[in-house]
Amino acid sequence: MLVLGTVLSTFITLIIGSDNLASLSFGKYFTYQLLPSYLLNAGIYTVLAKRNVVKAWNNALSVYLLSFIVGTVIVSILLQTLFIPPLWFVEVPLSIAFAIVGTVIGIKLGTQDSKEVEGP
């Protein structure tokens, strides 16, 4: 998940340009930078939850915390200082919301698939 998110963010930054990205309004920054990452993450959480419905919430929490910690450590090492995003108060709740939505969708899809396999 961390690798796919990094690839997506890097690709978007290359297309838009880091100078242009820094000067975007919050609405455009959200649309171009945050929303694609959140949608990708929600898709990954959906797949994880669909594969193992019983442990979906445990897996989602583990993946979220591990990704958050590893991402923060990597960025902090690269910047050589503890980095907390300036919009953390927006980004953290939104990322949690997308993780929850993805997990709920995955659980529903996994439950439907198991009902179809069992039959009437």
Image (tube, helix red, strand yellow):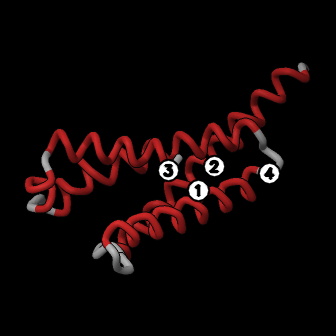
- Secondary structure type for disc 4: loop
Left or right side of 23 for 13: right
Task: Kindly identify which residue carries mark 4.
Answer: 55
Asked if the residue at tag 2 contacts the one at tag 1, i.e. Cβ–Cβ closer than 8 Å, the answer is yes
Residue occupying image coordinates x 17% and y 39%: 15
Q: Position of residue 58 (x, y in %)?
A: 75, 58
- Secondary structure type for disc 3: helix
C-alpha distance separating marks 2 and 3: 17 Å
- Which one is in front in this view, the residue at disc 4 or the one at disc 1? 4
- Name the N-terminal-most of marks 4 and 1: 4
Q: Position of residue 45 (x, y in %)?
A: 59, 46
- Residue type, numbered disc 1: Ile
- Residue, far bottom: 82
Quarter in which the C terminus is drawn: top right
Crowd band around label 2 with a 10 angstrom C-alpha radius: few (<14), some (14–19), many (20+): many
Q: Position of residue 21 (x, y in %)?
A: 15, 55
C-alpha distance separating marks 2 and 4: 11 Å
C-alpha distance separating marks 3 and 4: 20 Å
- Which one is in front in this view, the residue at disc 3 or the one at disc 4? 3
Between 36 and 73, the one lying in front of the other is 73
- Name the N-terminal-most of marks 3 and 1: 3
Image quadrant of residue 107?
Answer: top right
Residue occupying image coordinates x 22% and y 47%: 13
Crowd band around label 1 with a 10 angstrom C-alpha radius: few (<14), some (14–19), many (20+): some
Asked if the residue at tag 4 contacts the one at tag 2, i.e. Cβ–Cβ closer than 8 Å, the answer is no
Disc number at residue 2?
3
Between 44 and 114, the one lying in front of the other is 44
Disc number at residue 103?
2
Task: Kindly identify which residue carries mark 1.
Answer: 100
Residue occupying image coordinates x 39% and y 48%: 6
